[in-house]
Image (cartoon, grey):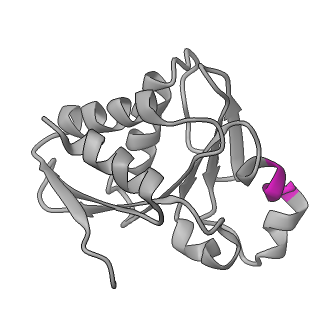
Amino acid sequence: MGAIMNCINVSNQKELEEIAEKLGKLVNSGDVICMVGDLGAGKTTFTQALAVGLGVEDYVTSPTFVLINEYHGRIPLYHFDVYRINDINEMEDLGYEEYFYGDGVCAIEWADLIKDILPNNHLWIEIKITGVESRQICFDGTNDYYKEMIEELLEK
């Protein structure tokens, strides 16, 4: 990784959710949130709390088999789980560009699997398991907009 990552350590799920909910209050239409991390690291939990910050009232579940779920909050949330994708063309079939370049927020789990089609500008989040409940969450922004968002997110 070339850029210096901005990382935060959380000791439990509640702290992870607080960060994600705060991010949900900061994001705007057109934002793309890319998440990576091992199975069980907390990507879906992060997205659920992000949805709370967006004012989504529906229960957010991982779209593992359908690849995308849509939720309505302050702005639409498009939750992608591309873990089971075998071919980038499956994203074409979904019409991913309408989502990535649309009016909602895209939260993409396993984003590293579709790196080739991600928009140039996005927020990259890596969740690392550091203990039973503890995690290290690292953020990287591709432009000043996302870098400022990260600074605001990590302010105490």
Indicate whether 136 appears above or below 113.
Answer: above
Which quadrant of the rendered structure holds the C terminus? top left
Residues rendered magenta in the picture: 94-98
Q: Residue furthest front?
A: 144
What main secondary structure does the magenta stretch of the protein show?
A: helix
Q: Residue furthest bottom?
A: 2
Residue 66 at least partly seen: no
Which quadrant of the rendered structure holds the N terminus? bottom left
Q: Quadrant of residue 49?
A: top left
Q: Quadrant of residue 128?
A: bottom left
Q: Residue 58's x, y, as percent? A: 58, 19
Does 134 appear in magenta? Answer: no
Q: Residue 90's x, y, as percent? A: 82, 68
Indicate whether 62 appears above or below 137.
Answer: above
Front residue (pair 150, 107): 150
Q: Is residue 17 left or right of residue 26?
A: left
Q: How many marks?
A: 0
Residue 148 at least partly seen: yes
> Residue at point 54% right, 23% down?
59
Q: Residue 124's x, y, as percent? A: 43, 62
> Residue at point 55% right, 66% down?
111
Q: Is residue 66 left or right of residue 32?
A: right
Q: Residue 95's x, y, as percent? A: 87, 56
Q: Is residue 152 left or right of residue 156?
A: right
> Residue at point 18% right, 39% down?
155
Q: Is residue 19 left or right of residue 21?
A: left
Front residue (pair 28, 43): 28
